[in-house]
Image (cartoon, rainbow, N blue to C red):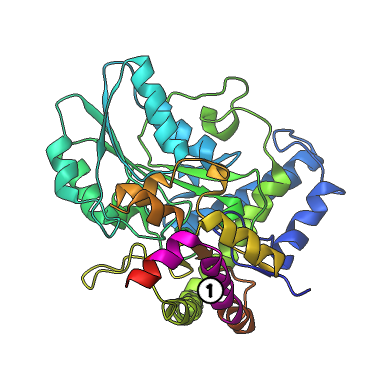
Amino acid sequence: MQRVYFDNNATTPVLPEVFEAMRPYFGEHFGNASSIHHHGQETRAAVEHARESVAQLLGCRASEVVFTSGGTEADNLAIFGLAQPGDHVITSTIEHHAVLNGAKHLEEKGCEVTYVPVDGRGLVDPDDVRRALRPNTKLVTIMMANNETGVVQPVEEIGKVAAEADVHFHTDAVQAAGKIPIDVNQIGCDLLTISGHKLHAPQGVGTLYVRKGTRLEPMLYGGRHERSRRAGTENVPGIVGLGKAAELASVGLRRGDDTKMAAMRDRLERELLAIESSGVNGAAASSHPTRVPNTTNIYFDGIEGEALVIALDLKGLAVSTGAACSSGAIEPSHVLTAMGLRPEQARSSIRFSLGKQNTAAEVEFAIGLVPETVARLRELSPVYQRAATSR
C-alpha cells in the first residue's frame, strides 16, 4: 500500500543529510562537550557549529542560542524564567498547550494572566495586546504561527507594542522555523522558541533564543551548561541534527522552497474545496501574509474529523484533526472554537501539513482519495443526509 504522510506539523521525518551529520556522535565522537580533553573538545566544536547554524536561521548571535530538550521546555523556560508572583502576563487564546498550561500554572502561583482573543481569521489584534497592558505586565507571549491553522500572527507589530511598554516579548516560532524567514531583530522579540522535530531534525532537541541582557531564572540546576541558563549535559547528536536542519532550512528559504511548498499546498486546498460544504479555517487576509506555506485546515460539514482521519489512514494517507498532543481529546479544538467555529464544525476539521519530503505526486494521491472518503462518510451520516435533503 502506498503511504503518504501529511502530518508534518505533528512531527517531521529526519532528513537523510541530518541523520548522516548526527551519526558520528552516536559512536566515534562520543565525548562530553564539557570535557577539556580531545574527545570533549571535538564534540564541543560540533555543538558550537550547530549553535552558529541556528543563529544564522534566526538572525541572532550564537551566544543568544540556548539548547533545550524541545519546544515545550523552551516555552516553559521563557515563561517561568521571567514571570514571578504578582506579575502580569499577556498571551492569546490559541497558543500551544506548552504556553497555555504554563500560563495556567502561573495563575496558580499568583500571577495575573490576560488571554487576548483572535478574530475569525485566527489573528491577534496588536491593539488588544496594547489595551491589555498593565503597570505590572512582565511578559507578552504570542505565537508566530499556529500549529493547527498555520496562521501567522503580526508579531512585528506586537513586538513594537511590547517594546513601547518596556515589556519582554516571547514568541513560539515552533511552526514557523524553516517555513518562513525569521529575523529576531525585525520581530523585536526578547525570546523565541523553535523545536527540532518540526523542521526535520530529531525529537528531543529545541532552542530558546534569549536576547543579550535578558535575565532568566533557570528551571534546571546543576552545571554551568548553556551559560548557566540550562543545566545538563548537552544532547550532542540532537544538537548536531538541529544545526544541520537549520542549515538546510536557511538554504531552502534562499532557494525559494517555501514558494514551491505553497504551490503544492494551494493545489491540494483548491481541489479539496471543490467538495460540497467545505471551507478553510484561517483563510488568508489580503493585507497579511497569514499562513505558513505548508499548512491548510479544512472543515467538511457533516462528518467527524477523527472518523475521516481513521478512514484516510486505512487507505494510506496520514493527516490529523489538529495538535498531536491533543489527540483523543473529547473537546473540540480550542484554536478553532476561539476563531468562532461551532463545535460541530470544529470537530469536522482536518489539518493537512506538508514537509520537505513530500512530492507533487503525493498531493495528487490525496486529491484522489479525500473526496471519495468524505462522500462515503457523509452517506453514513444520518444528520448530514437529513440536512442535504432539506436543502
- Quarter of the figure that contains the C terminus: bottom left
Q: Is 136 covered by the magenta stretch?
A: no
> Residue 10: x, y in percent?
57, 54
Please report the residue visible at 73 percent of the width from the left and 42 percent of the height from the top. Answer: 41
Quarter of image, res 91:
top left
> Residue 1: x, y in percent?
79, 73
Q: Is 376 covered by the magenta stretch?
A: yes
> Residue 151: x, y in percent?
36, 60
* Magenta-drawn segment: 368-386
Task: State whether residue 193 is above or below residue 361.
Answer: above
Q: Residues within 10 Å of mark 1 (few under 14, many from 20)?
A: some
Q: Give the residue type that dot 1 points to.
A: Ala
Whether residue 81 is visible to the viewer of this picture, yes or no, is no
Q: Is residue 145 rendered to the left or right of residue 54?
A: left
The residue that label 1 is drawn on is: 375
Q: Nearer the viewer, residue 387 or 340?
A: 387
